[in-house]
Amino acid sequence: MNKKTIWITGASSGIGEATAIKFAKEGWKVIVSARRVELLDKLSADENIFSYPLDVTDSDKAKEVFKKIIDDHGQVDLCIFSSGTYERKSEKELDVQNIKHVIEVNFLGVINCVSAVEKYYKEKNKGHIAVVSSPVGYRGLPKSSGYTPSKAA
């Protein structure tokens, strides 16, 4: 029987990393993506984890990486998009560039990854996509002028 395959973005730390480790222990073939290659390399020391570096803000690269994953592994049964970034800023430190970056990673990064897998899942008529968000999108968080709206989007 073929192992189930999962693709996890934001896998270099936090929820993404913990999710990758859990699925690998359960015997899944785990594909991990993130920007920090050295942390992905550490994760991929596990024989069930395979590293594909990706900056989710690059839509073309997301499509390229997903195509390579399919070429190398044949299928992806589940995607968990958990990339995220957060920089604590007070309301007096409004930083438009930072807010744009947070929205590009936390919101548009998900859109880029969904766009990369959408055609594949429609053609196969199967597969699942999960997105890691935050309750902060509903109730706010002090000193998070970019993070809160990016999670509410």
Image: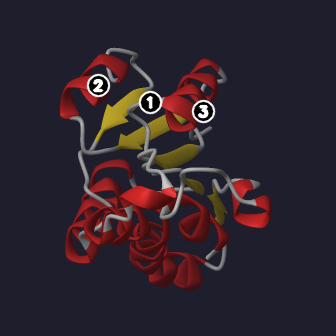
User: Who's the residue at 71% across and 55% down the image?
Assistant: 136
Q: As shown in the figure, which amino acid type bears the numbered disc 2? A: Leu
Q: Position of residue 88 (x, y in %)?
A: 46, 44
Q: Position of residue 1 (x, y in %)?
A: 62, 38
Colour logic: secondary structure
Quickly name the residue at label 2: 39
Whether pointer 1 and pointer 2 mark residues with C-beta atoms closer than 8 Å, the reply is yes
Q: Residues within 10 Å of mark 1 (few under 14, many from 20)?
A: some
Quadrant location, the C terminus: bottom right
Real-space Cα separation, disc 1 to disc 3, in angstroms: 10 Å
Q: Left or right: where does residue 14 sit relative to residue 56?
A: right
Q: Nearer the viewer, residue 31 or 89?
A: 89
Point out the tag, 1 or 2, that comes first from the N-terminus.
1
Image quarter of residue 152: bottom right
Closer to the observer: label 1 or label 3? 1
Quickly name the residue at label 3: 19
Whether pointer 1 and pointer 3 mark residues with C-beta atoms closer than 8 Å, the reply is no
Q: Position of residue 6 (x, y in %)?
A: 54, 46
Point out the tag, 1 or 3, that comes first from the N-terminus.
1
User: Who's the residue at 55% across and 23% down the image?
Assistant: 21
Q: Position of residue 34 (x, y in %)?
A: 32, 44
Residue pushed farthest front? 92
Q: Nearer the viewer, residue 108 or 145?
A: 145
Q: As shown in the figure, which amino acid type bears the numbered disc 3? A: Thr
- Against 76, residue 124 (above or below) is below
Real-space Cα separation, disc 1 to disc 2, in angstroms: 8 Å
Image quarter of residue 68: bottom left
Quickly name the residue at label 1: 13
- Against 89, residue 50 (above or below) is above
Q: Nearer the viewer, residue 150 or 82?
A: 150
Q: As shown in the figure, which amino acid type bears the numbered disc 1? A: Ser
